[in-house]
Image: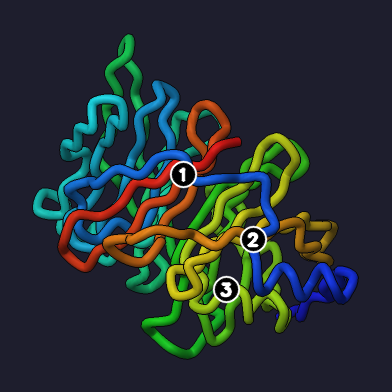
Amino acid sequence: MKRLNLVRLPLLLLFLSILTIISANAQVMSLKIPIGEASGIACLPNGQFLIVDDEEGVFFFDPQKTRVWPALSSQQYEFLDDLEGIAISTDQKSLYLLSENGGRIFVCDIVTNQQEIELKSPKLLGSLTKIGSVNNKGYEGISIINLAGKDHLLAAHQDKPAALAIFSLPGLEKITSCRLPGELEDLLKNLSDLTVDLRNGHILMISGKSRRIVEVKPKIGKDIEELEIISTTRISGNLSGKPEGICFDAYERLVVVTDASGDEGDFIRFDK
């Protein structure tokens, strides 16, 4: 596995990035949501969200009405267990789900009828190539990254090693993987999730343990060659649980959900 060369910031900036907030984003809204173990979130084309729960499956969430309702229940689809990640294809027609159990990836069709959205029955697409030796420190989040005009799956490996990996779609062949260098690993203890900013191609990673978001500018050739730290944001407030999921909403604002270990979780929105 390729070990990454980090583009180093000036010493003062790196010191500040570890101790303070270096970000244009500011928390502007926080809602309680009746999802106890939210671990990933994705935005639908109608502005609503899909949130995965470790144990219960997938839920729709409308922040304007603060309404939550089932989308894919793990009681109906028993194989949807240990869900940790969620991503929607660029054309918004396919939904991908990550199970920490074996790094399995499920896919289902997204069907839009006027403003109503329906998810078809999920199917097993395959499993991500294992890159660690600790079963409970596997893949924790996924996002879509577009390379050479094609959707690929970008996956966050939690720990031992903390790493990023890119896989083809739909075949899930591993294109490349890289271990996070020490500076990023120190900022992101137990990497939880990630998302890609379509405006500039930056990758934003989140750590529940560190309660921090780190934005990096990647250089991707045949491998992920560099990750330049652009900003870090410390998530503040009296949260119900650990920040576990991250995505952009329909207005290009960053949102985060927390895993509250069974209690009501948090939905946090940031300004642009």
Q: Nearer the viewer, mark 3 or mark 2?
A: 2
Give the quadrant of the C terminus. Answer: top right
- Give the labeled residue for mark 2: 21
Picture residue at 27% right of the left edge, 61% below the top: 240
Mark 2 residue type = Ile
Q: Earlier in the sequence, mark 3 or mark 2?
A: 2
Mark 3 residue type = Leu
Alpha carbons under labels 2 and 1: distance apart:
17 Å
Instruction: Please give left or right for residue 203 compared with residue 84 in the image.
Output: right
Picture residue at 46% right of the left edge, 40% below the top: 28
Q: Report the front residue among 152 and 25.
A: 25
Alpha carbons under labels 3 and 2: distance apart:
14 Å
User: Where is residue 13 shown, x and y percent of the image?
Assistant: 82, 68
Mark 1 residue type = Val
Q: Classify residue 244 by image quadrant.
A: bottom left
Count how many numbered circles sit on residues in the image: 3
Identify the secondary structure beneath mark 3: loop
Can you name the residue that lies furthest to the bottom here? 133
Q: Classify residue 213 by image quadrant.
A: bottom right
User: Where is residue 23 shown, x and y percent of the image?
Assistant: 67, 52
Picture residue at 40% right of the left edge, 40% below the top: 29
**Classed neighbour count for the residue bearing mark 1: other residues with Cα under 10 Å, few (<14), some (14–19), many (≥20):** many
Instruction: Please give left or right for residue 127 compared with residue 186 in the image.
Output: left
Q: Are marks 2 and 1 in contact (CB under 8 Å)?
A: no
Q: Is residue 21 above or below residue 42?
A: below
User: Where is residue 24 shown, x and y percent of the image?
Assistant: 67, 45
Picture residue at 30% right of the left edge, 51% below the top: 266
Identify the secondary structure beneath mark 1: strand
Q: Mark number for residue 188?
A: 3
**Classed neighbour count for the residue bearing mark 2: other residues with Cα under 10 Å, few (<14), some (14–19), many (≥20):** some
- Give the labeled residue for mark 1: 255
